[in-house]
Image (cartoon, helix red, strand yellow):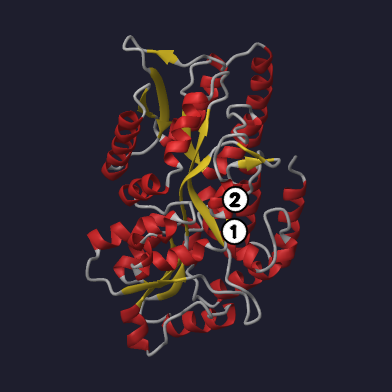
């Protein structure tokens, strides 16, 4: 269904592009200021406060512009962008999930800003890659995050098991999980629900084994490893139904010794389980000869809608590109700055929990990027579900998933 919808939208946008739809100009207000409108889907109080502060400070330092933002619910976001392409009623800038950006670049929504006066090399490579297609730049990473390994220190201490660290291999991780799986506690769990949320958490295991989103069979050892742990009961089979929030609730409740999750759960843990004694480290690596495990990037990008006048949008991106602006914005947002220098700020580096996520970011990669990502994520996560529910052997699941991936155009 997603693939059919995507193709229909692509045909629609191609036809509309011939008639010049979506090329509306910036609107002038009566006070002579050029109005810049940004769409976002931010819902929490801290995120709303972040946007107010960011826009207020931009307007103060750019008297010729008046930037405002419009909230669009996340569930309707892509639909509203698609309708906007058809009607020409679009904002000047959009903040969107990084994995969906390539699709909208392909649809012509976003402008090529490769010539903008921005030093692209100052950004962490993974987040920057998610804003690009065919070597061209279509925006900036706005916020970035990834998953890492959280562990309950009290459960480890009670079992006399050393904490995992950056040198922990898959084989050692499995043995640790075995020792902790007892008395109603599962050694490990993640979010493996059959949606892109599940792909976000499962895909890194495939990459760490040597595969990729296009090379499933090259990472078949990930399927083998996961199914072995599921069979032995040390990777909970409940994971196939769990969202990331579900995983964290079980971790807070003490039924999981280790969880794979992201930094957005840190405020939840502080508020709901303030006495929980936990640590964070990078995900386990494949073997002793391997480098640090891969993780998958989450977060948002910001791009300029493809209009004939991009000046105001570029001014806004150049403003956000300033390290001090990005740092203050991300402190409120509760995520990490995607710019290398900004991420070195003591706010993150001096906190051992945050620093562990920053370290994991060093080897994190985007989902795709591909205009056909919705089709890839369906095929890939179906494969993981078949492995984790024991519906297929790892070899058969990898073969079938590879066939499904190869068929995507």
Q: Which residue is mark 1?
A: 203
Q: Quadrant of residue 137?
A: top right
Judge whether 31 appears above or below 196 on screen.
Answer: above
The local secondary structure at tag 2 comes to loop
Looking at the rendered image, the quarter that the C terminus falls into is top right
Instruction: Say which of 257 and 81 sits in front.
Output: 81
Residue 75 located left or right of residue 14: left
Asked whether the beta carbons under mark 1 and mark 2 sit within 8 Å of each other, the answer is yes
Q: Nearer the viewer, residue 250 or 279?
A: 279
* Residue 248, numbered circle: none
Specify whether residue 390 is in view.
no
Please give the label number shown on residue 367.
2
All told, the count of numbered labels is 2
Image coordinates for residue 236, horizontal then vertical, percent: 47, 69
Residue 375: percent from left, percent from top: 65, 42
Instruction: Give the image quarter of residue 259.
Output: bottom left
Against 290, residue 400 (above or below) is above
Residue under the point 38% across and 90% down: 160
Quadrant occupied by the N terminus: top right
Query: What's the distance in space between the residues labelled 1 and 2, CA to CA?
Result: 8 Å
> Is residue 329 depicted above or below 281 in this figure?
above
Residue with the most extreme top position: 30
Please give left or right for residue 330 compared with residue 7 in the image.
left
Residue under the point 54% across and 19% down: 309
Residue at x 41% of width, y 87% of height = 161
Residue 186, position as x, y percentages in the image = 42, 74
């Amino acid at each position: 269904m997603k693939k059919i919808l995507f193709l229909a939208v692509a045909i629609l946008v191609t036809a509309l592009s011939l008639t010049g739809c979506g090329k509306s100009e910036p609107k002038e207000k009566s006070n002579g200021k050029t109005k810049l409108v940004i769409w976002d889907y931010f819902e929490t109080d801290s995120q709303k406060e972040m946007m107010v502060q960011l826009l207020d400070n931009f307007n103060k330092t750019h008297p010729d512009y008046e930037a405002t933002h419009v909230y669009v619910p996340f569930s309707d976001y892509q639909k509203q962008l698609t309708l906007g392409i058809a009607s020409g009623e679009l904002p000047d800038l959009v903040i969107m999930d990084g994995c969906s950006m390539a699709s909208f670049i392909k649809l012509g929504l976003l402008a090529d800003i490769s010539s903008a006066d921005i030093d692209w090399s100052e950004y962490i490579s993974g987040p920057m890659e998610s804003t690009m297609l065919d070597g061209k730049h279509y925006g900036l990473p706005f916020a970035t995050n990834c998953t890492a390994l959280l562990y309950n220190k009290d459960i480890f201490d009670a079992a006399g098991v050393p904490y995992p660290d950056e040198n922990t291999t898959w084989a050692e991780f499995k043995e640790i999980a075995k020792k902790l799986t007892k008395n109603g506690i599962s050694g490990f769990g993640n979010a493996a629900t059959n949606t892109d949320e599940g792909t976000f958490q499962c895909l890194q295991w495939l990459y760490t084994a040597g595969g990729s989103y296009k090379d499933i069979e090259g990472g078949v050892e990930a399927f083998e490893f996961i199914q072995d742990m599921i069979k032995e009961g040390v990777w909970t089979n409940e994971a196939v139904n769990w969202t990331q929030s579900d995983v964290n609730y079980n971790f807070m409740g003490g039924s999981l010794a280790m969880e794979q999750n992201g930094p957005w759960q840190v405020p939840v843990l502080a508020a709901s389980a303030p006495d929980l004694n936990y640590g964070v480290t990078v995900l386990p690596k494949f073997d002793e000869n391997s480098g640090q495990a891969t993780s998958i990037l989450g977060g948002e990008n910001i791009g300029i809608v493809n209009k004939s006048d991009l000046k105001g949008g570029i001014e806004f991106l150049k403003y956000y590109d300033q390290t001090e602006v990005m740092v203050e914005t991300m402190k409120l947002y509760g995520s990490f700055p995607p710019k290398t220098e900004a991420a070195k700020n003591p706010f993150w580096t001096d906190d051992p929990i945050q620093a562990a996520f920053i370290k994991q970011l060093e080897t994190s990669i985007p989902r795709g990027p591909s205009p056909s990502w919705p089709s890839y994520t369906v095929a890939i996560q179906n494969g993981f579900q078949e492995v984790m529910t024991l519906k297929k052997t790892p070899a058969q699941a990898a073969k079938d998933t590879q066939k499904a991936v190869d068929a995507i155009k």
